[in-house]
Image (spheres, rainbow, N blue to C red):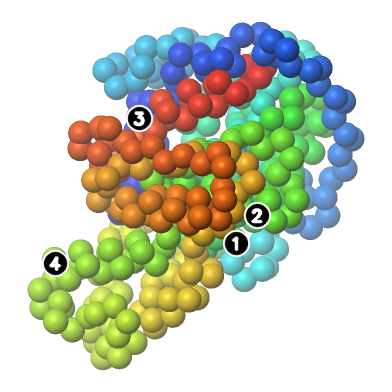
Amino acid sequence: MRRASILLLTGLLASLIVACGGGGAGSGSQPGSQPQAAEPVLSNASGPGEHRRATSLGRVTITEFQAALAGNAGRAPPLQPRYAVSSWRIEYRTTDADGVELTASALIALPDKALGAASPLLLYQHGTIFHDADAPSNHATADEPALLMASLGYVVLATDYVGYGTSKGVAHPYLLADPVAASVVDALTASRYWLQTQGRRLNGQLFLTGYSEGGHVTLAAQRALQVAGKQAGLVATAAGAGPYDVMATLDWALDHLRDEEPLLAALINPGFLKHLGSGVRKEVRKQLLKQAIPDDADVVFRTDFIDLFLDDQRDAIVQRCNVADWLPRAPMALFHGREDRTVPFVNAQRAFDAMKARGATPLSLTECQASPADHLPCVRPYWEDLLQRFGALARDL
């Protein structure tokens, strides 16, 4: 959750495209697959999930993708993207952390396929970013991860989240599970409707992925889709290096603060934070925020999780923030590095153990083999792993 996470977008470029999508490569369905049933006719939602408008953001050619990849020679795998990509900003209705309706935005990236060709749908949840210019719908360029993934043949939906894009100025519900999930679920509803109005065919397959904060949002979104009975077609989820157990992440951050601030160390102890004097409390809050959000951020973050932590409301953090302990009904792959100094590995281990104990299957936890196995060095291995997984399952790429 530290400032280093802002480098996630450029780190993704170094790792997005691998081997043309594995077993999903090619022009048609996998051998033995059944013909696709006709899609049901959708109507526009009223309220959350309502499509408001779509604005064209332009088209990126294969040549432009190649130039972007060449500019990252030595970091990006040498692969030729298969499609040019057209992108749009979708505006839709959702709710903020207080349940108030508002208009938010998302990027949708469409591979340039033959008329009538179908595609799988991939939901990409971005990592922590601190400047609105880096939100997906403000960054429809050849090095944008959503567009690069679309160049493989997926239709890609990348939600800006509340607080970015069209909803800039509203506080982003950082690490609050239900509000961030709502922004993804509502964007999915609105985008499916819009795609149908444009005559774009989806093949019924749905994939979810995200890294860092995006990993947290991905698990929150999958859980919300499952609870709402809307996860039909969900083939697989891949989440990397996310703070799924926010309570464990905050305990870890407090330990680091104690190491770095010896004058505070004797005064702060987990479970007794609510007894801090006002001056010490203010300083602890300031230092914890500094670890998460830089001073030059131009978006607003809700920091409920820190205030709950300082009030020793651990149960409230588990209820409002955590996405580690539930039973997923679709395949899930977790990926994390043991040396992660931004989001500790304990998040993935606790999520895996809790879900396994509830009977989750198939469920996997892959350890990053980069050296060091830290947050940013593990971005490339994560994307290589997930695209191989998804590529083996995806049809119609």
Disc 3 residue type?
Answer: Pro
Closer to the eye: label 3 or 1:
3
Q: Is the Cβ of the residue at disc 4 closer than 8 Å to that at disc 3?
A: no
Disc 2 residue type?
Answer: Ala
Mark closer to the chain start, 3 or 1: 1
Q: CA distance from mark 3 to mark 2?
A: 28 Å
Disc 4 residue type?
Answer: Asp
Residue for badge 2? 224
Q: CA distance from mark 1 to mark 2?
A: 8 Å
Q: Kindly state the secondary structure of the residue where label 1 is placed.
A: helix
Foreground residue among 357 and 106: 357
Disc 1 residue type?
Answer: Asp
Residue at image point 41% right, 56% down: 350
Residue for badge 1? 178
Q: Is the Cβ of the residue at disc 1 closer than 8 Å to that at disc 2?
A: yes
Mark closer to the chain start, 3 or 2: 2
Mark on residue 259?
4
Vertically, is 201 above or below 349?
above
- Quarter of the image where one finds residue 47: bottom right
Foreground residue among 220 and 160: 220
Q: Is the Cβ of the residue at disc 1 closer than 8 Å to that at disc 4?
A: no
Q: CA distance from mark 1 to mark 4?
A: 33 Å
**Left or right: 289, with 264 as reference point:** right
Mark closer to the chain start, 4 or 3: 4
Mark on residue 190?
none
Which residue reaches farthest left? Answer: 262
Residue for badge 3? 381
Mark closer to the chain start, 1 or 2: 1
Vertically, is 273 above or below 357?
below
